Amino acid sequence: MSSAYIIAHVRITNPEQYEDYKKWATLAMQTHGVEVCVRGGPVQTLEGDWSPERVIVLKFPSAEAARAYNDSSEYGKARQARQGAAEMQMILVEGA
């Protein structure tokens, strides 16, 4: 069984409201046993023209576990809190 990762790029539009999203997202991650690999931090473009503002990488034991987290009521609360606070691009990637 290979691991799976949710990788997200976030552009924060309302930093104060985004703090509420982070609170709910943290609770959802704890509830689902998510391994946080990257949550923000400085970004340096090494190649190409991609310049994300905030990057999140979450590790799961499987793609099914990642989907369960994303579809959960716990993360749903976070998603609602994020409305109007940020623009999110998110992908699911399976890998080692």
Image: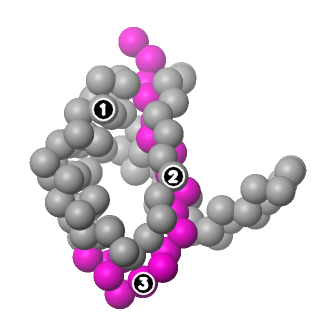
Would you name the residue on which mark 3 appears? Answer: 15
Is 2 within the magenta? yes
Residue 38 in view: no
Indicate the position of residue 14 as horizontal and vertical percent values: 42, 83
Query: For the residue marked with disc 2, what is the amino acid?
Result: Gln
N-term mark: 3 or 1: 3
The residue wearing badge 2 is 89
In the rendered image of this protein, does residue 20 appear above or below residue 31? below
| Residue at (35% x, 87% y) in the render | 16
Closer to the N terminus: mark 2 or mark 1?
1
Q: Residue at x 43, y 25 (%)?
A: 3
Residue corresponding to mark 1: 67
In the rendered view, would you say 39 is above or below 67?
below
Alpha-carbon span between mark 2 and mark 1: 15 Å
Identify the amino acid type marked 1.
Arg
Question: At label 3, which amino acid type do we have?
Answer: Pro
What is the spatial separation of the Cα atoms under label 3 and label 1, in whole angstroms?
A: 27 Å
| Mark 2 surroundings within 10 Å by alpha-carbon count, few (fewer than 14), some (14 through 19), many (20 or more) | few
In the picture, the disc for residue 36 is none
Mark 2 or mark 1, whichever is nearer to me: 2
Q: Position of residue 40 (x, y in %)?
A: 52, 66
